Amino acid sequence: MLPLAEIVNIAYFMEAKRDFEPGPYDISIAEGSVTTEREIAVIKQIREQSKFLLAAGVCASEGGIQGLRYFGDIDEMKARAYPEPEKVHALPLSRPYSEFVKVDYELQGCPIDRHQLLSVLGDLLLGRFPRVATNSVCLQCKRKGNVCVLVAGGTTCMGPVTHDGCGALCPSYGRGCYSCFGPMDDPKPQRFALELALRGMSDADIRRQFHKITSYATAYRGIKGGFDS
């Protein structure tokens, strides 16, 4: 980020500078997800002041790991976790920014890939239309010459349905993909669920595979067991 700071004016970034400049802004980058009423108002204000809005990370684009509250009762969760749950003003769901405002570009990942971030910012600064790859992790594995951990090793791997961008980090070390980058475009998750079922995985375990880091993602949240209709 240091070379970037030499060619742009960072107007508001409290982790990098104490003072801030009022908008409007050319580019705004929003992290996290919407979990309170206040955050709805904040993201709307950011959208109004921004020419381009980037959602950075799977929390911002898919609701993140806190999206697991989709499968439970928020009041029960607060009662179990906090001595004074009535003081926790959290929404029942953790939702991405795109459900409330127009998001121009989404960068997947937990965390995001710095090369994708700099590529998108560089394109915008040059007046070009940014292009972010939307292939699966499997394609990255093939490009790196990795032996498939799912086919050859029998290791559960979410690579076939997961957005690329991580460089196939986990499979490169013989581990299955956790879907940190969320679903790829048109992942056909139910078909992959059937593949996992044919390999002996139970319906409950299949659902757990999808309901981890990006459980609120539209493509994942309604997944059923491998043999469910």
Image (cartoon, rainbow, N blue to C red):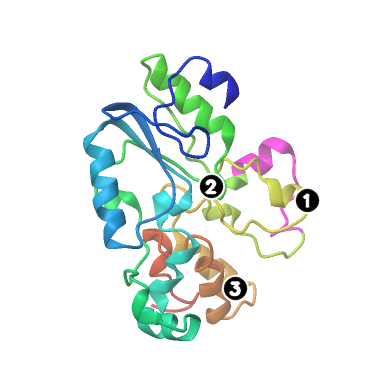
Label 1 or label 2, whichever comes before in sequence order: 2
Res. 9 mark:
none
In front of the other: label 3 or label 1? 1
Find the magenta span and give its range. 139-152
Q: Amino acid at mark 2?
A: Gly
- Disc ID at residue 198: 3
Determine crowd level at label 1: few under 14, some 14-19, many 20+ residues with C-alpha closer than 10 A: few
**x then y, percent, for residue 103:** 31, 41
The N terminus sits in image quarter: top right
Cα distance in 3D space between marks 2 and 3: 29 Å
Position in image of residue 176 (x %, y %): 68, 59
* Residue 73 can be seen in this image: no
Q: Is residue 44 found left or right of 125 in the rendered image?
A: left
- Give, as a three-letter code, the residue at label 1: Tyr
Question: Circle 1 sits on which residue?
Answer: 173
Q: Is residue 167 above or below residue 76?
A: above
Local SS, label 2: loop
Reading the image, the residue beneath label 2 is 109
Q: For the point 38% across and 77% down, which residue is it?
A: 229
| Mark-to-mark CA distance, 3 and 1 | 25 Å
Asked whether the residues under the numbered discs 2 and 3 touch, taking CB atoms below 8 Å apart as contact, a structural biologist would say no
Residue ID at (60%, 53%): 159
Element carrying mark 1 = loop
Point 45% across, 70% down: residue = 68
Relative to the observer, which residue lies in front, 62 or 46? 46
Evaluate whether residue 92 shows in this view.
yes
Question: Callout 3: few (<14), some (14-19), or many (20+) C-alpha neighbours within 10 Å?
Answer: few
